[in-house]
Structure formats: structure tokens, C-alpha cells
Image: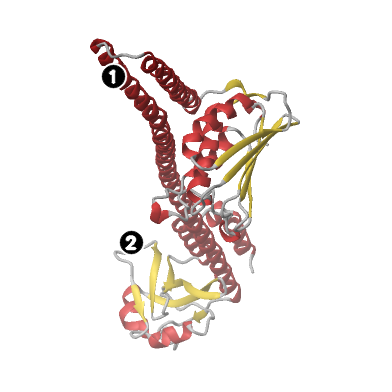
Amino acid sequence: MTQTFYNILHQVSKSHVIDNGDLHAANSLILNSVIEGLKIKRAGIWLLSEDRQAMECRLLIDQANQPEETPQLFRQDYPRYFAALDQDRAIVAHDAHSDESTSEFSASYLTPLGISAMLDAPIHHRGEMTGIICCEHQGPTRVWTDDEVAFVSALADLYGRALSAEQRNNYAKQLQQSNELLEEKVKERTQWLENALRNLTHTQAKLIESEKLASVGRMVSGLAHEINTPLGIAVTSATHCESELRRVQKLYTQGDLAEDDFKQFLMSLTEGIALVSHNLNRAANLVHNFKLTGAIQTSSEEEEFELNNCLDIIIKSLQPLLKQHTLNCHYASDEAIRLSSYPGAIAQIITNLVTNSIHHGFAGMEKGSINIHVAAQQGQVHLSYSDNGCGVAPEIQDKIFEPFFTTARKTGGSGLGLSIVYNLVTQKLRGKINIESQLGLGATFIIIFPMSAADGPI
């Protein structure tokens, strides 16, 4: 190969145009290099269709005339030429009018344009022939040399490199577009999830508040029932005292009041007033305890308080709910346990656990028993809540803290009671809760939380 060909190939090979993905610029560079090296005026780049039944000119340079349209060739019109292309070798037609591969173009193409010789070098991309560089000599018959064939073939290989660069660029653009689309979808989905989370949080807050109100409602209902009993006794006793007073007044007015009648009246009045006083005090204590528990229940702020007093008040307020059942609280030490935490959360936890025992554990039982054991160890409160109810089946123990999971849906269970307990223990008190239970042997909830909520989760 001549030095001129080497120089041209070297310049084209190191040009950034070949590898920057701009195929149109690469086409122009390669065809102008072909025209310069072969000293011809007409050259083109043709690419095969996917089915190899046609070939389209991607760029045609004619220094004598400006092509008016992009030509196409079809296999059905030039079968011998396409058969030669199928050989995947260069077509070297020194006399294009008589060469078997190119003679089909003589009348319609070669003669009108004055083309006497053709040199077509195959373009390979990824191991397959995808087109040709077509070199057309106008004028007297020309014999193509081996160096010229090798020169054009080398340029055809460089065109294959330019095709790969364009493909890489297209892949990169597609990848960028895909990434942008993915980022947009991620943003949309993130926004949707954030909205859903906000709605869920709002709904959860409303449900928790609803459950709190429901538990307060149950306590109010139980309290009303408990208050009615001493008030009923007090009213009955007061009525009896009024009746006795009218009877004695009548005897006195008629002058028939005997000393024995008066003594009997005084005794009856004393017993009646004592009964009224006792039952009114009992009702007042119930209301007082309920007010204290209500203050604890509605407290949402972190406070310093004694856990022992807090639990005693909570347990007293729950007595109307317990009725025939018993609830006892045991402390590991006589010393008061001082906390910096949330008494409202503790009240809600105990209330929900007691409600759960009454409605689920003690269902069908005449008398149930609840025991709470409390101890302080190494800056942590260990609270064990146990009942002797029906227990929890092993297969559902992992689900009982899930929202809306309940085994009493038909009887109006919401499935939120123990879920609220779990959230209050883990989020508000920054602790943890576990259940230990066997069917028929009751259930034990073990709750551990820091004595100071500021200490963080366990």
C-alpha cells in the first residue's frame, strides 16, 4: 500500500469524528478520503436492509453534480449484483459494463453518469456485512490495484467502527432516557408513598384516638353501673328515713307518740343516715378515681411521676370493668419507682390489656384473675401482665399485634387494641413487648421499657 494511502488512513483512524457517534460526519470524512485517495469524483455509502432485499444510499458525494435524491436498489431489479454482495467480498469491476456483477446497471445507471469502473468494499459490523462503500470511476476504463482495494476495505472497516460509536451513543441516550424516566417514576411513586404514609398516619392517629375514646367509654359505662349501686342504696335509705320522719311527725301531732316509738325512730334514722353517708362516700371515691385516671389517660406529655401511684390509680378506675374478675398488682420492692416517661401511654396500655383479657381471655368464664408484677432493674422497668384466661393459639401469636387482626370480628372486635399497645410500648415508651401463652393456660405479656424515655429504645 502506498504512503499516500497510509497517511490518509492514519488521519481518518485517529480522527475524533470516527468515535464520537456522529455518523453523518463520519460518512463525509470517509467518502472524502476515498475520493482523495482514489482520485475519483463519485463515491457513496450504501447500507443493506434487515432482510437483505434492498440497499439504500446513506450518503453520496458527486463532485461533478449534486445528487437530487437518495437512490435505492432492490434485489428483484438487480439479482446478479445482490448475489455478488452475498459472497461478502469486494466487487472489483474494472469494466463495469461487462463485469457480471455490475453489468445490470449499464443502461440505467452507468452509461447516463459516464461510469466505467466500480469498486465496492463490504462494510462489516459485529461480524456481519451491513453495506458497502461504492467507488465509481468516470471516464476511460480503469484497472483497480490491490493497494486501492485494500485502501477502500480499510476505510470500510473504519466505517464499521463509526457504526459502533453511533450505536454506543444511541444506547447511552436510551439509557439516559430510561434513567430519567425511571427517576421520574421513582419521584412519582415516592410522592404517592409519602401521601399514602401521611394518610395512613392520619388514619392511624384517628383510629388510636377512637380506640382511646372507646376505652374511656367502656370505663364510663362500667363506672355508671358501679355508681348506680351505692346511689340506689343511698336513695332507698333516704326514702326510708323520710317515711319514718313523716310517721313520727304524725304521731307527735296527734299526741300519740310513745317513748318506744321515738327510740325506734332514732335508731332507724341513725342506721339510715349511716347507710346514706357510706354509699355516697363510695360513689364519690369512684368518681374521684375516675377523674384521676382520666387525667392520666389524656396526658400526652413526658412527665416525672411514681409508677406505683400511677398503676394504683389505673387499677382502681378499672374496677367497674372487672366486675366479678380480680386484678392484683405486685411490686418487687417497697421503694417507689420514679419514671420520666408518659403516664398516659402506660394507662392506655394497661386499660387495653385488661379490656383484651375481659373480652377475649375470660370469655365464657365466671371469674378470671389478672396479676401484674412490676420491677425496676438497671434503669429499666420490667412489667409482666398475666391472666388465667383461654390463652392464645401458637399459630396466631405472631399476628396479634398486627392492626385489625382479631378473632372476635363477629362480636364487634376492632383488632386495634393490642396493635395500639404494641405501638405505645415500642414508639412512645421506647421499649419492647412479647407474649408467652398456651391454650387453656392464660397469656402473659412481658413489657420492658426505660425508666427515662430520653434514654432511647432498648
> Would you say 250 lies left or right of 116 here?
left
Q: Amino acid at mark 2?
A: Gln
**Total numbered circles:** 2
Q: Are marks 1 and 2 in contact (CB under 8 Å)?
A: no
Q: Position of residue 334 (x, y in %)?
A: 72, 26
Q: Name the one closer to the observer, 309 or 22.
A: 309
Residue neighbourhood size for the residue with mark 1, other residues' Cα within 10 Å, grouped as few (<14), some (14–19), many (≥20): some
> Would you say 236 lies left or right of 136 here?
left
Q: Name the one closer to the observer, 18 or 298.
A: 298
**Residue 98 found in image quarter:** bottom left
**Residue 395 found in image quarter:** bottom right
Q: Report helix, strand or loop for mark 1.
A: helix
Can see residue 160? yes
Q: Position of residue 325 (x, y in %)?
A: 53, 43
Vertical arrangement, residue 176 with respect to residue 270, above or below:
below
Q: Position of residue 206 (x, y in %)?
A: 40, 37
Q: Report helix, strand or loop for mark 2.
A: loop
At x 48%, y 51%, the residue is: 179
Q: Name the one closer to the observer, 173 or 76.
A: 173
Q: Position of residue 132 (x, y in %)?
A: 48, 73
> Would you say 75 lies left or right of 406 here?
left
The answer to which of marks 1 and 2 sits earlier in the sequence is: 2
On the rendered image, what quadrant is the C terminus found in? top right
Can see residue 342? no
Residue neighbourhood size for the residue with mark 2, other residues' Cα within 10 Å, grouped as few (<14), some (14–19), many (≥20): few
**Residue denoted by label 1:** 247
**Between marks 1 and 2 in the image, the one whose residue lies nearer the viewer:** 1
The CA distance from mark 1 to mark 2 is 137 Å
Vertical arrangement, residue 290 with respect to residue 321, above or below:
above
Outermost left residue? 254
Q: Amino acid at mark 1?
A: Arg
**Residue denoted by label 2:** 66
